Amino acid sequence: MLSFPNKILPIKKNVTPTLPPSMNLPQSLLVSLLSGLLGLVFGGLIGIACVKWFRITSFEGASGYAVVGMAIVGALVASVIGLVAARWSDPTFGTGLLRATISVGVTALLIAGVCRLFADPLAFEKEKPAAPAEVIVEDRFALPAADAPLSAWLAVISYGAPEDTMNAVISAVSHRPDFLEEAKQIISGEDDYLALAAFRMMAAHSAPTPAWNHLVSDAGKDLAGRLRSAIPSPPGSDPTFQEVANFSIRFFGWIDAAEALRKRNRGNCIPELKAILELAEPVTESLVLQNDVCRVARHHLKEWSGSEN
C-alpha cells in the first residue's frame, strides 16, 4: 500500500497588487492651476519675444496688449494641458504634476519655434557694435560743411538725432532756394532712411512753408505706387514681405510730415492716405501692414476727415 506524507500544502490565494493612490479631483484641479501659472509665464515671455520678432508697434499700447493677450492664452492652454495630464491614466499627484510641467514646456517651445519661423527678418539684423560716446558725438552727429548737399545733412538725422542737432539741420537747409528740388529727388530716390530723414525734418519744422504741401502730396502718391509694387504678386511669392517692410519706413516718416503740415498750414493728404489704406487693407498676410500701417492710417484718416467737416 502506498503511503503519502501527512503534510498539507498551503493553498495560494489570489493577491491583488497594491497600486499607488491616484489623484482625486481637487488634486487634479491643483495641477491644472499650477500648469496655468506656468503657462502664464511662458505666454508672457513668448509675447515679449513676438513684439520684437514681428515688430509690433507700441502705438496706442498695441505691444502691451499683445504681451498680455499671449500670457492669458498661454495660461488657458496650459490649464487644459495640466488637467488632461492629471486625469490621464490616474497618476499620482507628483507624476501628474511632472507630466503636466513637461507637456507645457514642450508646447511653449513649439509655439515659440513656429513664431520665430514666421517672424519679420528685419528684427534679427545684427546691430553694429556701439562706438565710444566721444566717437558718437564727433562722428555720428558731426555736421557737414555749409555748402554740402542736402543728402549729407539729412544723413546726420537719418537714424534719429538729438533735438539740437535736428534744429541745426533745419536751420541750415530749410531756407535753401533749391531745397524743394533736392528734397524731391531724395524722397523719390531709393534710400529709405534718407527719405525718412527728409520727412522728419519737415515734420519738426516749426513754420513749414505752404510750398511743402505739394511735395508731401506727391510723396504720398509715390508711396502708394511703391506699396503697389511691394505687395507680392502672386500672393505668397515673397513670404518675408521685405519690400513691404521697406515701404513702412517711408510711410511713418510721411505720415508725420503730412500731420505737421495739416496742423500748421492746412495741408491735405486725405486722398493719398485713402489710396494707401485701400491697397494695404486686403493684404492680411502682412503683419506690418495690418498691425502698423493700416491701424495708423485709419486713425489719421478718421481724425483728418473729422476736422474737414
Image (cartoon, rainbow, N blue to C red):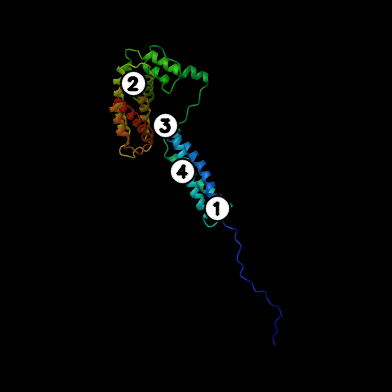
**Residue where numbered disc 3 is placed:** 60
Q: Residue at x 52, y 52 (%)?
A: 85
Is there a contact, CB below 8 Å, between mark 2 and mark 3? no
* Above-or-below relation of 7 to 33: below
Amino acid type shown at disc 2: Leu
Q: How many other residues sit within 10 Å of disc 1, few (<14), some (14-19) or many (≥20)?
A: few
Residue 73 is labelled as 4
Label 1 to label 4, Cα distance in Å? Answer: 23 Å
Give the labeled residue for mark 1. Answer: 26
Looking at the picture, which amino acid does disc 1 mark?
Answer: Pro
Viewer-nearest of discs 1 and 3: 1
| Element type at mark 4 | helix
Q: Nearer the viewer, mark 1 or mark 4?
A: 1
Q: CA distance from mark 4 to mark 3?
A: 21 Å
The answer to whether any part of residue 30 appears in the image is: yes
The circle on residue 221 is: none
Quick one: label 2 or label 4, which is nearer the N terminus? 4
Disc on the earlier residue, 1 or 2:
1
Quadrant of the drawing holding the N terminus? bottom right
